[in-house]
């Protein structure tokens, strides 16, 4: 059974940075679509960034372009999200998600694409 475990969330001030990690167990990165999805209270889930683990090609939501970077470490089966220049509107629960053995589209993967989910890690950005 494939499991995703997120870590690295926390509280930060606007302008600061956080780095999220997502460790995958039960599957080896191999041409999957993986991504980060966030959900603020009272709002729908939003695809933030996604990456094709086969090619390493990333895609980002317009709201985070230039500030967030998605990356992978294939040797550790781990996905990362480096979040810089944080804004209060970046606050929410961040989920790591995967659609195994499927390529990502040319745009940030929508939440409904993913079939495997982690439990999430909370990010809170204060002004």
Image (spheres, helix red, strand yellow):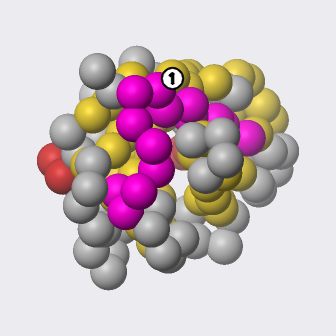
Q: Quadrant of the C terminus?
A: top right
Residue 61 percent across, percent down from the top left:
43, 66
> Can residue 2 be seen from the camera position used here?
yes
Residue 96 at x, y percent in the picture? 44, 37
Q: Does residue 53 sit above or below 1 in this rendering?
A: below
Left/right placement of residue 42 relative to residue 37 reads left
Residue at the image point whose x is 66% and y is 73% from the top: 66
x 76%, y 56%: residue: 85
Question: Start and end of the magenta stretch?
Answer: 19-32
* Drawn side of residue 87 relative to residue 56, left or right: right
**21 in relation to 30, above or below:** above
Residue at position x 35%, y 57% in the image: 32
Residue pointed to by mark 1: 5
Residue sitting at the far left? 112
Look at 73% across and 41% down and name the residue there.
19
Q: Position of residue 33 (x, y in %)?
A: 34, 58
Q: Quadrant of the N terminus?
A: top left
The x, y position of residue 107, in whole percent, is: 33, 75
């Amino acid at each position: 059974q494939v499991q995703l475990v997120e870590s690295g969330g926390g509280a930060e001030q606007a302008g600061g940075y956080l780095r999220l990690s997502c460790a995958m167990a039960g599957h080896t990165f191999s041409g999957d679509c993986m991504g980060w999805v966030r959900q603020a209270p009272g709002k729908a889930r939003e695809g933030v960034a996604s990456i094709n683990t086969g090619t390493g090609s990333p895609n980002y939501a317009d709201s985070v372009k230039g500030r967030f970077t998605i990356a992978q470490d294939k040797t550790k089966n781990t996905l990362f999200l480096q979040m810089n220049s944080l804004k209060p509107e970046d606050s929410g629960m961040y989920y790591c998600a995967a659609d195994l053995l499927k390529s990502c589209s040319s745009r940030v993967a929508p939440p409904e694409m993913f079939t495997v989910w982690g439990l999430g890690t909370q990010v809170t950005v204060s002004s």
